[in-house]
């Protein structure tokens, strides 16, 4: 009995799966990390792991921007929002992320004015409409959203707006991948590279993974067949002893990315010396802050940011899940104390989080666990 | 947020070259196309939109594939469309 949703090209998927199986060397295990939360979603939605041979294991990576924000940063944001005349804005995904003292929704119940916006440009509009308020945009996300923040800052500067600022929490994917590669916890054989981040940064930044670490990288699209095709491309490289960067998603991702986007990011923001990531700890040069030229728009200079550090709740194992060391269902509180309705950790909050994807679509996996338990009983 | 939403460019605004009206699943809103200034889209082109900004041009087949992926996501996609409806970029 099949519990996962079959997709329209299931025949092609089975054909690809057979080609992947044929490339497996007997006795060898393959661990491939999909970096992007969108890919994790496709994998569970379509039960792609069930197409793969037992020896090919998919490991979920840290590519969920909400998931990697540490709890202390949420508390810092709430502190900013509590200052006189402040309207804080952020993306909807952030509203339910628990900090040490609750989420943005909880803070609003206590009197802060934190609004969700679709775009940083909506935040700019709020600033225009409320000249007597100080409007702070809490900017989060990888390189997919950083250009939008940058364009908005440039626009605000052109308009001469003085009541708009950015609380920058943009992170960059490459240092996180490097941290995982340097982590002793996990040995990976290759990477399914993120699709939309790569539309901005292109494929070249991954070359060090192939060159210095000897691991193949294939930038992949989001359809189930894209992911299986990418796994096949990784397996071909591994079987031939090659490690190169290949682009399976070339119909969307240019090899050199989006030069305009990279230029505006560089114009408005620069790398921080270090930034704390949930689960991965402090990683050097892994996040962006506002450039001095735009200091008048840097919320971290305009306000006192306490720099709160809060340890994750003991029960929460998001850190291990983000590093790919634990599968979501191996976390002690998964699906019991921690659900999308009452999340303890960020991986359950964001739809791009591995735990939320597992919770929504991981039926097959849970059945597998149940089967294993029956077999072992 | 990391997931691009496909939209079809409906009209351009000569007085505001960074803006374009797009159609996303029947919802028409303004977005910013400044990040595509190297190769600006024209009406009829499809773009992938991230938080109000077109980040890449795509073809119609890719747009359909991206849409089917997003619809499969369910609630998160509905939330994104609801947020887009609230958006009043100008």
Image (cartoon, rainbow, N blue to C red):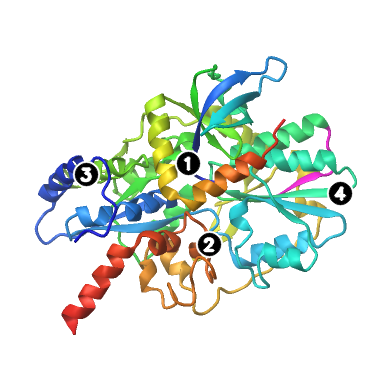
Mark 4 or mark 2, earlier in chain: 4
Q: Earlier in the sequence, mark 1 or mark 4?
A: 4
Q: Quadrant of the C terminus of chain A?
A: bottom left
Q: Which mark is residue A197?
A: 1
Q: Chain of mark 1?
A: A
Q: Cα distance, mark 3 to mark 1?
A: 27 Å
Which disc, if any, is residue A10? 3
Q: Is residue A273 above or below residue A157?
A: below
Q: Residue at x 41, y 40 (%)?
A: A195
The secondary element bearing badge 3 is classed as: helix
Bin the neighbour count of mark 2 within 10 Å (Cα to Cα): few under 14, some 14-19, many 20 and up.
Answer: many
Mark 1 to mark 4 CA distance (whole Å): 34 Å
- Residue range of the region highlighted in magenta in the rendering: A160-167
Q: Nearer the viewer, residue A221 or A154?
A: A221
- Label 4 in the same subunit as label 3: yes
Quarter of the image where the N terminus of chain A is located = bottom left
Residue neighbourhood size for the residue with mark 3, other residues' Cα within 10 Å, grouped as few (<14), some (14–19), many (≥20) = some
Q: Residues within 10 Å of mark 1 (few under 14, many from 20)?
A: many
């Amino acid at each position: 009995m099949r519990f996962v949703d079959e997709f329209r090209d299931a025949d092609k998927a089975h054909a690809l799966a057979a080609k992947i199986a044929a490339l497996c060397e007997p006795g060898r295990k393959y661990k491939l990390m999909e970096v992007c939360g969108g890919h994790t979603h496709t994998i569970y939605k379509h039960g792609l792991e069930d197409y793969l041979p037992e020896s090919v294991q998919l490991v979920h990576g840290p590519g969920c921007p909400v998931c990697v924000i540490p709890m202390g940063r949420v508390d810092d944001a709430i502190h900013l929002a509590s200052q006189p005349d402040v309207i804080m804005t952020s993306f909807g995904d952030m509203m339910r992320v628990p900090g040490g003292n609750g989420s943005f929704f909880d803070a609003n119940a206590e009197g802060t004015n934190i609004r969700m916006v679709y775009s940083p440009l909506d935040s700019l509009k709020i600033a225009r409409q409320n000249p007597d308020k100080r409007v702070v945009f809490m900017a989060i996300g990888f390189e997919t959203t950083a250009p939008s923040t940058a364009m908005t800052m440039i626009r605000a500067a052109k308009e001469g707006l003085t009541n708009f600022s950015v609380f920058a929490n943009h992170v960059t994917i490459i240092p996180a991948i490097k941290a995982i590669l340097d982590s002793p916890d996990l040995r990976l054989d290759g990477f399914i590279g993120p699709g939309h981040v790569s539309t901005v940064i292109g494929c070249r930044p991954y070359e060090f993974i192939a060159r210095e670490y000897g691991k193949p990288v294939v930038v992949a699209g989001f359809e189930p067949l894209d992911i299986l095709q990418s796994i096949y491309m990784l397996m071909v490289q591994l079987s031939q002893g090659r490690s190169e960067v290949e682009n399976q998603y070339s119909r969307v991702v240019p090899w050199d990315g989006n030069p305009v986007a990279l230029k505006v990011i560089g114009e408005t923001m620069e790398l921080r010396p270090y930034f704390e990531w949930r689960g991965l700890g402090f990683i050097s040069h892994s996040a962006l802050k506002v450039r001095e030229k735009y200091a008048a728009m840097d919320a971290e200079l305009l306000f006192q940011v306490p720099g709160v550090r809060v340890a994750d709740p003991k029960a929460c194992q998001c850190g291990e899940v983000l590093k790919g060391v634990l599968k979501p269902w191996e976390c002690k509180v998964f699906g019991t104390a921690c659900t999308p309705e009452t999340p303890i950790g960020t991986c359950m909050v964001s739809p791009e989080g591995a735990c939320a994807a597992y919770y929504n679509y991981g039926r097959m996996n849970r059945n597998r666990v149940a089967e294993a338990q029956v077999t072992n009983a | 947020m990391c997931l691009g939403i496909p939209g079809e460019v409906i009209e351009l605004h000569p007085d505001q070259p960074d803006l374009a009206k797009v159609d996303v699943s029947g919802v028409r809103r303004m977005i910013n196309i400044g990040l595509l200034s190297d190769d600006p889209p024209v009406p009829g082109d499809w773009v992938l939109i991230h938080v109000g900004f077109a980040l890449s041009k795509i073809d119609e087949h890719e747009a359909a594939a991206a849409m089917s992926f997003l619809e499969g996501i369910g609630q998160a996609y509905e939330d994104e469309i609801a947020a887009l409806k609230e958006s009043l970029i100008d």
